[in-house]
Image (spheres, rainbow, N blue to C red):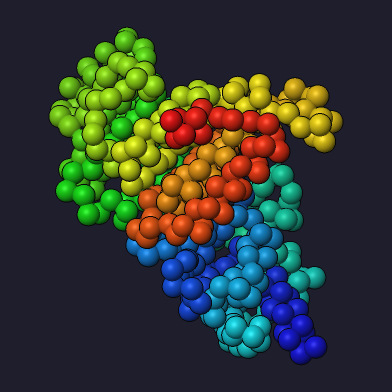
Amino acid sequence: MENITQWDKLKGKLNQYINVNLKEIIISNARNKDNITKVKVRPVLLKQDVLYQVSSFRGKQVFHENVESEVLRENCIKWLQNDFGQMEVHNEQGTLICLSNKKGTITIKEKKSIPVQSSAEPLRNGCLENDCKQKQGKEGVQNSEETGITQERMQQLSHNRKKQYILEENVPVGFLIDLGVQTPQGKIIRTAYDKFRQINRFLEFVEDVLPALEDKEVIRILDFGCGKSYLTFAIYHYLHELKKKEVQIIGLDLKEDVIAHCNALKDKYGYTNLQFLTGDIKDYTGQDEVDMVVTLHACDVATDYALYKALKWNAKVILSVPCCHHEVNRQIKNEALQPMFKYGIVKDRMAALVTDSLRALILEKEGYETQLLEFIDMTHTPKNILIRAVKSNKMISASKKLKLANQEQEFTEFLGIHTTLQKLLEE
């Protein structure tokens, strides 16, 4: 009974501490050193909404995710119950320290810097109860008078957001100017702001996986279906110009005029270790060794061919944002799920989720630590799931591989599908 009371007490304290006045959360003392070893959290202001950036540390890798306050509070409880022994929550009103053991017993210590107000009363520099987003719903942060957030705090949260951008606003970058994202003065063109955020978001994913490539003297990257090559140029600029790493990057696309334009631009910038080729993902055989494979919106089975090539090269990193899932849409069949499949829009979304879940399962079976993550906001494009796979340093055990193979078989038989990636690996 005492244990339940303590967990309930912790939930109440998290309601008081996780709001716009939060400074930082540090979760440490991991019980499994092979998994996530530390978590750090800070508030950020995105699109006038207060969210919480969660940074998870696994070895030398760092993974970032933005979540709402309710999700963060639930995760804090789960982390202490299952994975970590200590949590420190730093807020303008004080510090909360929680210690947890494997038996499920927790100890809560609190050091207040100012009196903690009741959740029923508005915080002078914060919001009612939890955060400004809960208070205002979809309207977001309107002004300091409505939300209770001081202008100083707004600036702090905005500063947190701006620090996430790897390519900064008002700093001219040649390829961004030529591709219509920036003005010559570095200002982001209004209609290209989504593209600017998309580029920066992708570079965050690249930054996260860099530790997996640190032993490479030259990082070899292949971008399948590069198109106008916003991301290809961005990767080269980030790794070679900003991080001072040796790279060899190839962009591949079917459109000859697009490839010619990209080659002209890379010559203009003096990007000597970047080249663009005309070709099909399916037939490409130009490399024997590739460290990172990138695919952005490669249509339908083109993504499968790109993933297959990456597996053959034993690539350390795969970053793939699939587009279109016609193959599974045509195949998927299950009488029990027919009430869903008779609606085209539902079947289409189901096919997309099934396809990418299966791809992630296969990559995990092949020894990759795999995640399905939101690439960009759904309002920009519905094709917003990114498959991030990093080759594990540990060989996958035979028992785990068998378990995953059985899951794959049961999953595909249940839905009546057999994908191109499966066929390529079987051959």
Q: In which quarter of the image is the N terminus?
A: bottom right
User: Which image quarter: residue 291?
Assistant: top left
Q: Estimate the x, y position of residue 307 in percent, counting from the top left.
A: 42, 35
Q: Residue furthest top?
A: 257
User: Which image quarter: residue 335?
Assistant: top right
- Residue 180 seen in the figure: no
Q: Estimate the x, y position of residue 9 in percent, counting from the top left.
A: 73, 81
Comparing 416 with 255, the one in front is: 416
User: Which image quarter: residue 196?
Assistant: top left
Q: Estimate the x, y position of residue 145 in percent, counting from the top left.
A: 68, 56
Q: Residue placed at 45% from the left, 59% from the top?
A: 397
Q: Residue placed at 70% from the left, 70% from the top?
A: 15
Q: Residue placed at 61% from the left, 42% from the top?
A: 409
Relative height, residue 1 to residue 302 (above, below): below
Comparing 217 with 123, the one in front is: 217
Relative height, residue 308 to residue 66 (above, below): above
Number of numbered tags placed on the structure image? 0
Q: Residue placed at 55% from the left, 47% from the top?
A: 405
Comparing 111 with 242, the one in front is: 242
- Residue 120 seen in the figure: yes
